Image (cartoon, rainbow, N blue to C red):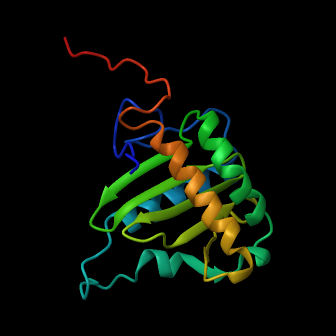
C-alpha cells in the first residue's frame, strides 16, 4: 500500500499551483492546459450532465501512440527523476469524484494521469505544441514503458506521504 500526499500543503507543489520563475510563454500555456485537464479528471461532470459543455479531456486531447508523439518516450523516462528532484510546481496530487490524479511538470513537457480507480488516461503535452495535449491510447508497444513510468512516479510521490523519507518543510503556524 502506498499513501499519496493528496492536497497536502506541506508538500512542495501539492495542493496548489506553484509556478517557477522564468517560464517561457509555451511552458506557461502547456502547464495551464495540463492543470486544467488535471482538474477535469479530478472533478468530471456527473454522468449524463453536460450543460452544453463537451468533456474537456476528450475535447482538448488527441488520441496517439507514444511513438507518434515526439518527446513522449523521453518524458515518460524522465518523469520519475523529475519528481524525485522536486522543485516548484513539479508534482500535483489531487483526489475527487474522478479518483486520484497526478500531474508532473518537466522542463519542456507535462504528464497527467489517473491512478485510482484505474491508471487512465495518460495525457502528455510538450512545449513544442503547447496548445495541444495527447491522450496515450492502448499502446502495446510502449505498455512496459508506460506502466514503469507511472509506477515509479507514484512511488516517488508516495515518498512524500505518511512515513515517507522526503524532507517536509515546516508548516507555518497561525498566530
Task: Tell which residue pokes out farthest to the top in this image.
Answer: 175
Q: Is residue 165 left or right of residue 52?
A: right
Residue depicted at 68% across the width and 69% down the height:
144
- Quadrant containing the C terminus is top left
Left or right relative to 11: residue 106: right
Residue 69 in view? yes
The residue located at (27%, 66%) in the rendering is 97
Residue 3: percent from the left, percent from the top?
Answer: 37, 46
Judged from this view, the residue extending furthest toward the left is: 175
In the displayed structure, 170 sits above or below 8; it is above
Residue 59, horizontal then vertical, whole percent: 50, 81
Q: Position of residue 108 (x, y in %)?
A: 72, 51
Q: Nearer the viewer, residue 118 or 112?
A: 118
Residue found farthest to the bottom: 48
* Residue at x-position 78% and y-position 58%: 74
| Residue, far front | 1
Give residue 168's quadrant in the image.
Answer: top left
**Residue occupying image coordinates x 74% and y 79%:** 141
* Residue sitting nearer the eye, 35 or 77: 77
x and y percent of residue 107 in the render?
71, 45
- Give the tally of numbered discs: 0
Q: Quadrant of residue 127?
A: bottom right
Relative to 128, 88 lies left or right: left
Q: Nearer the viewer, residue 76 or 141?
A: 141
Residue 131 seen by the camera: no
Amino acid at each position: 500500500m502506498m499513501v499519496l500526499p493528496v492536497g497536502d500543503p506541506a508538500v512542495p507543489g501539492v495542493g496548489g499551483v506553484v509556478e517557477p520563475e522564468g517560464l517561457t510563454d509555451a511552458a506557461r500555456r502547456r502547464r495551464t492546459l495540463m492543470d486544467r485537464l488535471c482538474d477535469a479528471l479530478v472533478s468530471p461532470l456527473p454522468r449524463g450532465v453536460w450543460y452544453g459543455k463537451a468533456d474537456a479531456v476528450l475535447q482538448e486531447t488527441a488520441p496517439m501512440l507514444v511513438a507518434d508523439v515526439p518527446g513522449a518516450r523521453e518524458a515518460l523516462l524522465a518523469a520519475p527523476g523529475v519528481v524525485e528532484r522536486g522543485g516548484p510546481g513539479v508534482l500535483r496530487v489531487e483526489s475527487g469524484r474522478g479518483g486520484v490524479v497526478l500531474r508532473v511538470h518537466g522542463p519542456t513537457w507535462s504528464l497527467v494521469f489517473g491512478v485510482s480507480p484505474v491508471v487512465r488516461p495518460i495525457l502528455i503535452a510538450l512545449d513544442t505544441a503547447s496548445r495541444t495535449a495527447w491522450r496515450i491510447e492502448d499502446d502495446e508497444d510502449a505498455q512496459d514503458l508506460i506502466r514503469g513510468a507511472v509506477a515509479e512516479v507514484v512511488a516517488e510521490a508516495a515518498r512524500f506521504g505518511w512515513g515517507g523519507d522526503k524532507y517536509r518543510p515546516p508548516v507555518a503556524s497561525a498566530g
